[in-house]
Amino acid sequence: MAALAASLAPPAAPGHFDELRGRATRLPPPRGNGAPASAPATLLRDVASPEPAAETGTADERADLDDDAIAPAWSHFFEELGPGGFADLPRRAVSLARQIRDNGVTYNVYADRDGPQRPWSLDLFPLIVSPESWAGIEAGVLQRMRVLDRVLADVYGEQQMLAEGLLPPALVQGHPGYLRAMQGVKPPGDTWLHIAAFDLARGPDGNWWVLSQRTQAPSGLGYLLENRIAISRQFPQAFESLHVQRLAATYSALMEALQRLCPAGAPPHIALLTPGPYNETYFEHAYLARYLGITLVEGNDLTVRDQRLYLKTLQGLRPVHGLIKRLDDEFLDPLELRPDSTLGVPGLLQAIRAGNVLVANAPGSAFLESPALLGFLPALSRRLLGEPLELPSLPTWWCGERAAMEAALPQLTECAIKATYPDDERNFSAVLGSQLNRRELDEWAGRIALQGEAHTVQGYQPLSQMPTWSREGQIAPRAALLRVFAVSDGAQSWRVLPGGLARLAGQDLQIASMQRGGSSADVWVQTHQPIDRTSLLPVHATPASLARHRAPVTSRAAENMFWLGRYTERAENAVRLARLALSLLSSEDQSSHALLEWLHQMARHNALVPRDVPSAPRSRRVFERSLIAELGNPDGGSVGYSLRCIRDAAGAVRERMSQDVWNQIVRGEAEFSRQASEQAAEVAMGGLVTSAVLRNLEAASQSLAALTGVQTDRMTRDDAWRLLSIGRHIERLSFLSDALGVGFDIGAVHELSGFEAMVALFDSTITFHARYQQRRDVATLVDLLVLDGDNPRSLAWVTQTLRGRIARLAGSAPGKLTALSYELPDPANWTLEHLCAPGEGAHYPALVELFEQCETAAYHVSDAIGTRYFTLTSESLRSVGV
């Protein structure tokens, strides 16, 4: 099998290290003038210092270039493919893609709220790292963590490195990521960095080089977990026989360290701060929070009171002792950093300075990510640790120093030019000197001479290439970067996650970037030691240990669930009303003035038509055309608007939605809007497509019915679900009360066509005919649509259900109501005799009063719930826990 793999897999490009064969591919022979052909230029994401490379390649990796045999680890991998061998790989690739799709793994490249989320791209083959290579990587990364952590402690403390000239002040204090508000702060455990990522590449000599470091909010810890699960399932025999190190123990060590270092709290409450569902890596944020058993929060979920951080929950304010941030520093606190930030928490920096919350990583590390700073790390390592850097970096020249600029300018054709200070007015996209002509090189040289401090020049080298499984069903080499992670396991102590995230360049690119169409691969780190099979969940689970995996319901999540319920019910009501209106306008009942007036008023109340549209009795055709034209309008309040609001509300609590439910919401909204837009255009051209519109509304009704079934039968009955249900029933109570009130007010209920229309709007036609046969009087209508406690669309059932759900939300015992429940009328006091007692001129004053009372109560209860549970501005401002 290994020989077959060698014959099927082409070698890496000349001058690149071939991961499959464990050695570099020989360059072509010299050209006629004696100059060797240049290797393909590779733009690295970040590169650093001029330290000489320490040799980390194994003997197998430095084998004879003429030998086409593949490396032992890869040979072992292919031998473990099983009986199907290579012929089974296409099936596994399809299975892998299905698993990624079914699990909802996404990476939204452009963070486009209106665009489709891009499925996560994962290659079928893993990157295999030998124990010898990993030992060098692990030691070098741990050393760099110690250096970087001490650099931060010095920069925000005594600043000896600045005073001694080992760090240029312009590179630190002139960087937008340097936060003066953190000066003098000493974080818990005197540990600044808890999670850091390092991008590594293997050069043609087989040695690993550090290309960049990420310290603000490094991404990948969640995606690599998903990669591991997916790929190990595709190759279980190879995964086991290659002695691949497991990952869970490192995550467990991180959580234990954060819990020990958190300020007072037993047990400490730790949350993960995300920018929200429109961030490109939001899937990872939700995934990681679930895996670690911590609360996923956005900035508006949190508040600072008396220099302490609190989470706004349905039960009140809950203290937060630790925060894993996935938010760039500048957005953390609008009071002291970016005032336009809506993602952070006002007063957060004050809580950090007071020592009341641990933030991983501590704010202020962004300047460490500058490519220019990496060139100063060798001297810093010798000064702070008394050790040379074990992992080398590429030559780097920060052009803010005149000598470095003069050394770099003659080498521009062989280097990359990068911005020293990202995310400010001096930022620019990196360029590769070998891709510039003479005039462009001169222009860049001029810019560097004028603003040297804003430019960093770095060398480059070809990236190693690993075997991948192409869409065409072939093995193809592609350039790869390895991202590894170091996490804290105690005060000023770290460990390296024994794995990582490999990022692969596109087929026609040498740039390994997910945002440029690249993909990812799992990373298998081999070991000679026994496998650590630690699980994140304890073997002997206790209620306390399991409680960590039951995150509280935040006020933001609760509010979005509440509105998800309201908009689902509102969309169902709008669809049912639109179908009824279009059907009646095309029937023989269109001559009923009262019925047409009832339809018009209901359509206006529910935003199905603009308010200035002539009434249906005056101009039935104009009314009908306006209704069709408005159906898909996402801004007009009609069906399309409600469907869009369902998608937005569900997107804000995406971590609570299964992939099936989310797909259904997105597809249903997109398909309805597409067809409604086409039909509105046809109406504008003079056509009338009532039958096609009715089919579109029927499809929307079926999609919403399926969503209702999921909400009713497939969701856990926690407080978030109760708020979703309360939202639905508030909307239903308001809609049905209004429909009955308008029907009685204009007298439509007293005509046969109006009577039947009202029963149909309540979705009760079959029940009514079966129960009352041919009776068509007010008593039968009231009995079924107002008093019937078994009809889920009667006012009595809706009101009684609301009273009970509100009481359970407040934590009352079953059957015991709360003050807010009593704001709703009590159906036990309703009687048929009282409600059907006629007044003057066939009016029913008790009924009309009840309809008004129900509608008013619905809005009042909605406002009260928002004040008490969402904004937390009334008596709910209390702290739960310590």
Image: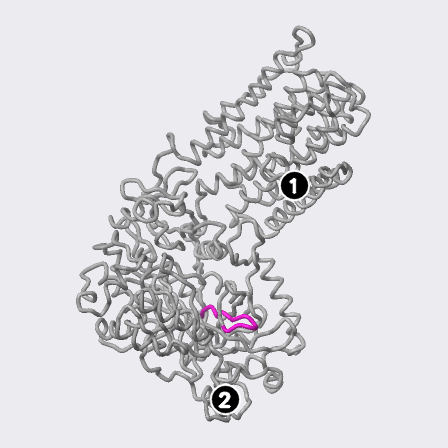
* Amino acid on which disc 1 is placed: Leu
Q: Which residues are magenta?
A: 499-510
Residue drawn at the location 68% of the way across and 24% of the way down: 614
Secondary element under disc 1, as helix, strand or loop, is helix
Given residues 375 and 363, the one toward you in this image is 375
- In the picture, which quadrant includes the N terminus? bottom right
* Amino acid on which disc 2 is placed: Arg
Q: Residues within 10 Å of mark 1 (few under 14, many from 20)?
A: many
Q: Which residue is mark 1?
A: 704
- Residue 134 can be seen in this image: no
Given residues 697 and 752, the one toward you in this image is 697
> Do the residues under discs 1 and 2 have CB atoms within 8 angstroms?
no
Secondary element under disc 2, as helix, strand or loop, is loop
Q: Residue furthest right?
A: 588
Query: In the drawing, what numbered circle is on residue 26?
Result: 2
Task: Name the spot of residue 663 as percent of width and height, x first.
Answer: 61, 51
Q: Is residue 199 magenta?
A: no
Task: Name the spot of residue 239 as percent of width and height, x first.
Answer: 53, 74
Q: Is 348 drawn above or below residue 201 in the view shown?
A: above
Task: Name the spot of residue 27 as percent of width and height, x first.
Answer: 49, 88
Residue drawn at the location 43% of the way across and 50% of the way down: 275
Given residues 9 and 139, the one toward you in this image is 9
